[in-house]
Image (cartoon, rainbow, N blue to C red):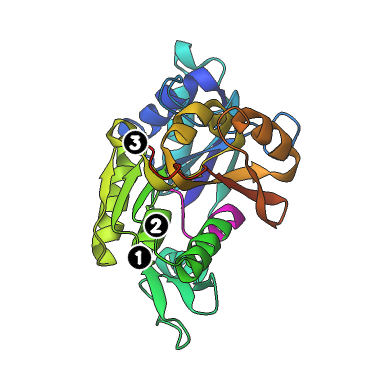
Amino acid sequence: MVELTLRAPETLVEPVSDALMDELDALAVAVEDADAGSSEERALFGEPGLPPPAAGWQRSTLRALFDDDAAAERAATLLLAQDWAREVHVQGLAPVPDEDWVRLTQSQFTPVAITPAFWIVPSWHAVPSEATTVIRLDPGLAFGTGTHPTTRMCLRWIARAGTAAGAPYKRVLDYGCGSGILAIAAALHGAREVHAVDIDPAAVAATADNAARNGVTLRAALPDAASGAYDLVLANILATPLRLLAPLLAGHVAPGGRLVLAGILERQADELRAAYAPHLTIDVLDSEEGWVLMGGARAPRPEGAAA
């Protein structure tokens, strides 16, 4: 196989990707931030009330996989001959080693210990003998496999809260659910009603599938399905959308309930505190590899007050 690498502006990422897959016989196309690792790097996200996420970055690198040199060269020639593709540039053409791709991919995902007893285990691995609570989860289209520090911290908090609390959180909202891993963890640790919402229909479908595979019941839907107050609101997204969503997320926290936020770099903690200050007092609950977990609680309703 051969990999064709192209550079394109954000506006051309979608038409170039479509042309490569639909007309030029590419086996797969991946899009990366050409400025990753630099001060120009930026995240892509989308939330209710915000513009939809862009198809690519301002300067995007596209990597297209082809059967052989001839197919890749033909694709590059035909693509660059189009008037609309004048800002697309070829960065390289390189052979891809013949690998057992399934085995290689699986080797990169091994069981993840969240606590000594709580593990995330891919379907092709045996469950570790010390694991008493397990989520079976394979990498897929939706974010959240337990390998990223933000997800690990959320899962660790859920496991400890579920063990330490006198009673489990009854009604839980996972906002921006991705793979559904946090929602599933909440259900496994005693939550009775779990709502998992995401702007991406693929994430909603992945959450429903993963919940079924793990034998838990939850409601997976688009964000408008989140309704009323919850004993626990979880959101593992990114700092900017978390800041913009402060009124919405805090508004879903019931009296006596908790809010737990992740996707926040250590240097962003103060801006998140300020964004949530009109609604809830939040602080750092955990930290790992430069990321922090933040959260806070709403005061319980006074005795005798109307519900």
| Element carrying mark 1 | loop
Q: Earlier in the sequence, mark 2 or mark 3?
A: 2
Of the numbered discs in the image, which one, if any, rests on residue 169? 2
Q: Which residues are magenta?
A: 143-152
Residue 167 rendering spot, x and y as whole percentages: 40, 65
* Left or right: 286 in relation to 305: right
User: Is residue 15 depicted above or below 303 in this figure?
Assistant: above
User: Is residue 87 depicted above or below 55 in this figure?
Assistant: above
Asked which quadrant contains residue 148, the reply is bottom right
| Mark 2 in CB contact with mark 3 (< 8 angstroms) | no
Residue at the disc numbered 3:
306
Residue at the disc numbered 1:
190
Q: Earlier in the sequence, mark 1 or mark 3?
A: 1
Q: Residue at x 42, y 25 (%)?
A: 14
Callout 3 crowding tier (Cα within 10 Å): few <14, some 14–19, many ≥20: few
Q: Residue at x 54, y 14 (%)?
A: 86
